[in-house]
Image (spheres, rainbow, N blue to C red):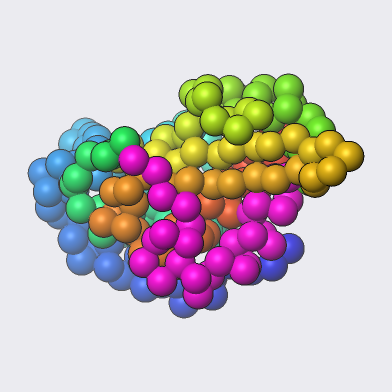
Amino acid sequence: MAVLINELDALNEAVRRFAGISGDHTGITLRTGALYDPHRGKYLLDYLGERYEISPDGSVQKEASREAVPYNDQVLILQYLCSASGLPPRGHWLSFLELPHGELHHAPFQHDALIPLARAFGHRLEAFSLAARILGGEKLSLGDCAAKFLAFPKLPLAVIIWSGDEEFPPRASILFDAVAPTHLSTAALWVLGVELARKIIALAQG
């Protein structure tokens, strides 16, 4: 499995940035949609269907779980907490290519997210629907099967599957709400899309 982020450097930088602003409880909660628990001194943030606890020092763990959080997820959570603009979803979808400088990451995004989704679900639409529901997805009327996922409280993504036939192979797409570039960089959105694809596929295989 390819490493999407230069893990240690990116995590250290994200931890450093978050530790520098973690005392701004009101600002962070208003910008991100996270909650702050003053009794535990931790932020609570929903990410791809699960709740995470973030300490002021930047450590991230799943709520009520000792399970290790993967590096990419830790980095994305901290980056969102640091950079989210506070703007709500706009209800307008963008393809990856329509994101700022999306062409720079488009080929790896196809390789790491869209092609695996098409292969996994192009002939298994029910499996996609079931996995999407487990991950908190909301059904959409797009393609042959689609769902909207709240990656973060103010950042929805959509996954669309087109089934294959004798003429055309299966296809998949991941769309981002138009507000996405105000919350995360395009490079981070690439990682977010790939992590969403991996989680859906893993649920269907598990």
The outermost residue toward the right is 166
Q: Magenta region, mostly helix, strand or loop?
A: helix
Q: Answer yes or no: is residue 72 visible.
A: yes
List x then y, in percent, for residue 75.
Answer: 44, 60
Residue sitting at 80 percent across and 46 percent down? 169
Q: Nearer the viewer, residue 81 or 130?
A: 130
List x then y, in percent, for residue 94.
Answer: 41, 50
In the picture, which quadrant includes the C terminus?
A: top right
Q: Is residue 99 magenta?
A: yes
173 displayed left or right of 205: left
Q: Answer yes or no: is residue 59 visible.
A: no
Q: Nearer the viewer, residue 174 or 38?
A: 174
38 displayed left or right of 178: left
Q: Nearer the viewer, residue 168 or 105?
A: 168
List x then y, in percent, for residue 167.
Answer: 84, 43
24 displayed left or right of 149: left
List x then y, in percent, for residue 121.
Answer: 75, 36
Magenta segment boundaries in residue numbering: 92-118
Residue sitting at 46 percent across and 77 percent down? 9
Residue sitting at 58 percent across and 54 percent down? 194
